[in-house]
Image (cartoon, rainbow, N blue to C red):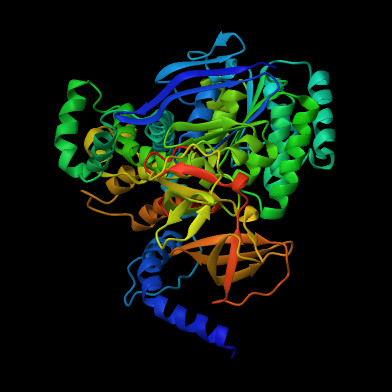
Amino acid sequence: MASVTISGVEKWFGTLQILHGIDIDIEDQEFVVLVGPSGCGKSTLLRMIAGLEPISDGEISIGTRVINNVPARDRDIAMVFQNYALYPHMSVYDNIGFSLKLRKRSKQEISEKISEAAEILDLTPYLERSPRQLSGGQRQRVAMGRALVRDAQVFLFDEPLSNLDAKLRVVMRTEIKALHQRLKTTSVYVTHDQIEAMTMADRIVVMNKGRVEQIGTPMDLYDFPANLFVADFIGSPSMNFIEGVVAADNEGPFVMAKDRTRLAISRDSSAELGQKVIYGARPEHLVLSGGSEGFGATVEVIEPTGPNIQIFADVAGQRICALSPERRTHKPGQKIRLHCPEASVHLFDASSGARI
Amino acid sequence: MTPKLKKSLLYWLLLSPLCVVILLPFGVMFVTALRPRDELFVYPPTWTFSEFRWENFVEMWVKTNFGGALLNSLYVSLTSTIIAIVLSIPAAYALSRYRFSGKGLYRNFLLMTQMMSPIVLVLGLFRLMVHLNLVNSLNSLVVTYVAFNMAFTIWMLQSYFNTIPRELEEASWIDGATSFTSLVKIFLPLAVPAMVVTAIFTFINSWNEFVLALTLIRSQNDYTLPVQIFSQVAGRYQVEWHHVMAATVLATVPVAIVFSWLQRYLIRGMALGAVK
């Protein structure tokens, strides 16, 4: 097991720059998730760690060893691919044992290791089958098994769950996390699914357009998003944004939306009077208020999800979403009042998008 | 009559003119090969004959030196198929996996070589072979067949190679395989259907080739089957048609059998490749 250090890494395809100087320190035994929309460069970065993509500039080290020029087979890493990449002409047993065979381990050791991995992953009854006779979830586990027997220093996962159906994805997510807690191998996991990132990661790296937007623990990112992009990307349903200008009256500072709706903010806020800002509130922080507290909204659509009811409403010409656990029935067109506790309000500079 | 049966009958009816056109020469071939010599030119022509003359084949074999020509054909077709495949695999692999300058140009060049009929080039090729001292050698045919077939084999293999996921090789590299091990243990086993299909095509092309064989081979001992059979017809006072047809049957049937046996690979290979 080892740490992974990525410093100043750039990637160019011809004249097109894909990664703009990435710096990430991944500690030993840590589970780090790279998350971002498709095309943000997260998979490219993972492939560069794996040695499948040359590094244009900067340095990647595993432990104390710089691996820029080390071929993939000597990096002592294991990788799980999105399409599993199981060798179709080999049995499950041979798939899992392939790396050990290449390393010329004894037959007995190979068979011990394979049965141990199969035991952990519930694959024992399927060892003689070929990959095409397995279900998606089983294939996924074989791919994990292939990584497991290696005792590699670092595990790399490239969107390993995106080919599974929604239910299985949740199950496998927990299994991978449990496996990491047991083996404690340093892991780098790429996904575009923020829920996967939130649930699995020790730390999340949010990437966008080849840059790192923010690095932090899941709750850090959720509670203190560094900018609009992170605020929008993390959390589902995503944060509501209302444009406005900072103003103040005798009740304290507030953000005045376009139609003069008053959105209260904290007195401790460092936003300046007259500054153009974006007011952000998570759906789960917007509560229905009985009295005159908060701001007015017009109900547009109601979506019950079971535990909650999603209320989509119009505020200052923008559609926002509020989560309410109450089973009160609202009608489209109904006027309601919503309130967000000042401590839960996020403010972003309208021009730079940075957190205020 | 069920609607399904009606439909099939209708389709067969529509197809029948085509079947007649295709099957008639084969019918004539079989019937002529098996009838006694005196019944060759009865008028009006009939499909029936008095006895099955299997001796025709034996006589033909001896008289026309069929065995020698068969060996020549086998040698030329097998060798050129093997060489073409062995040389095409690296080329197709490079085209499928690597980015290099001039790749598009090279592909177009391969395509263009297919646009020229061998007969246009036959004179030039003959002079080239004279220069290389290869005229009258079966190897001249091997070289030219390999050259003519490689454009096709490279295209065919490349389009199939493209369907083999890159991740399989990447996974094997990460598992600790060198590029060579990965190629031999992972990539090529998966490419077997494509290699079989391409080999069949190349073999049949070489087996049936006539113009180049006629031009480049001068001595009767080195004739391949098509030329040998042709020589039984051309420039003779008397053509032994029953022998010619017996030879044609022997030259056609084995290939047809092999072809139909391998056709499951053919369909699989084509369906997986870009040809579908």
**Quadrant of the frame with the C terminus of chain B:** bottom left
- The one of A35 and A261 positioned closer to us in this rendering: A261
Measured as percent of width and height from the top left, residue B59 is found at 44, 48
Measured as percent of width and height from the top left, residue B247 is found at 40, 50
In the image, residue A111 sits, relative to residue B274, either above or below, namely above
Q: Relative to residue A94, is residue B111 drawn left or right?
A: left
Measured as percent of width and height from the top left, residue B12 is found at 46, 78
In the image, residue B87 sits, relative to residue B212, either above or below, namely above
Measured as percent of width and height from the top left, residue B179 is found at 51, 22
In the image, residue A319 sits, relative to residue B251, either above or below, namely below
- The one of A158 and B173 positioned closer to us in this rendering: A158
Observer able to see residue A108: yes
The image quadrant of residue B110 is top left
The image quadrant of residue B112 is top left
Q: Relative to residue B270, is residue A146 drawn left or right?
A: right
Q: What residue is rendered at 23% in x and 50% in y?
A: B234
Q: What residue is rendered at 49% in x and 58% in y?
A: A262
Q: Residue furthest top?
A: A64
Q: What residue is rendered at 34% in x and 57% in y?
A: B241
In the image, residue A332 sits, relative to residue A50, either above or below, namely below
- The one of A164 and B198 positioned closer to us in this rendering: A164
Observer able to see residue A91: no
- The one of A167 and A109 positioned closer to us in this rendering: A167
Q: Relative to residue B236, is residue B225 drawn left or right?
A: right
